[in-house]
Amino acid sequence: MDTTLEVLTTRRSRREAHRQWPDELKGRIVSESLRPGVTVNEVAVRHGLKANHLSSWRTLARQGKLILPEPEDAVEFAAMVVETPSQIGTLEPPAAKQTSCAEIVVGPVTIRLEEGASAARIVAIARGLAASS
């Protein structure tokens, strides 16, 4: 009795295996990977891509070469006070201020967060500063 053996493979050619990801989708995936408590690896696995690809997309986003979508969560606003520099030539040093709030200093800009600012708020501000530099 003659039998025939046929082998079916799921192997694709190199050209078929290379997927094209639209920038809009890349942006949504990168945005998902930036949420607090989420790792690059778990987001990559969820979307069926390699973690190093997602990391390179995150780099593109930091460089401003990949646009991220608007955040889905409600936007928080923090009070901001802009102080003018003290007058030049005064003999008295400015009085030290008693503050119990967090300050983020980047060059000539000082951001003071309200007392009790959430960790998520501080992370959002830090990410915004990192993205703009």
Image (spheres, rainbow, N blue to C red):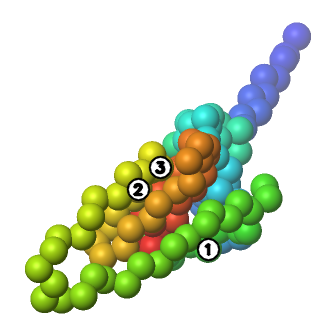
Residue in the image at 85% along x and 16% along y: 2
Sequence-earlier tag: 3 or 1: 1
Residue 59 falls in which quadrant of the image?
Answer: bottom left
Give the vertical position of 7 relative to 128 (above or below): above
**Closest to the observer: 116 or 95?**
95
Residue 108 visible in image = yes
Q: Name the residue under label 1.
A: 67
Local crowd size for mark 2, using a 10 Å CA cut-off: few (<14), some (14–19), many (≥20):
few
Q: Mark 2 points at which residue?
A: 103
Query: Which label belongs to residue 94?
Result: none
Whole-percent x, y for residue 47 in the image: 70, 45
Local crowd size for mark 3, using a 10 Å CA cut-off: few (<14), some (14–19), many (≥20):
few
Local crowd size for mark 1, using a 10 Å CA cut-off: few (<14), some (14–19), many (≥20):
some
C-beta proximity under 8 Å, tags 3 and 2: yes
Amino acid at dot 1: Ile
Amino acid at dot 2: Glu
- CA–CA distance in space, label 1 to label 2: 28 Å
Q: Is residue 43 left or right of residue 107?
A: right
Give the vertical position of 37 relative to 63 (above or below): above
Whole-percent x, y for residue 96 in the image: 28, 59
- Count numbered badges in the picture: 3
The quarter of the image holding the N terminus is top right
- Identify the element where label 1 is drawn: loop
Q: Is residue 69 left or right of residue 65?
A: right
- CA–CA distance in space, label 3 to label 2: 7 Å
Sequence-earlier tag: 1 or 2: 1
- Identify the element where label 2 is drawn: strand
Residue in the image at 71% along x and 60% along y: 76
Q: Mark 3 points at which residue?
A: 101
Q: Is residue 91 left or right of residue 37?
A: left
Residue 68 falls in which quadrant of the image?
Answer: bottom right
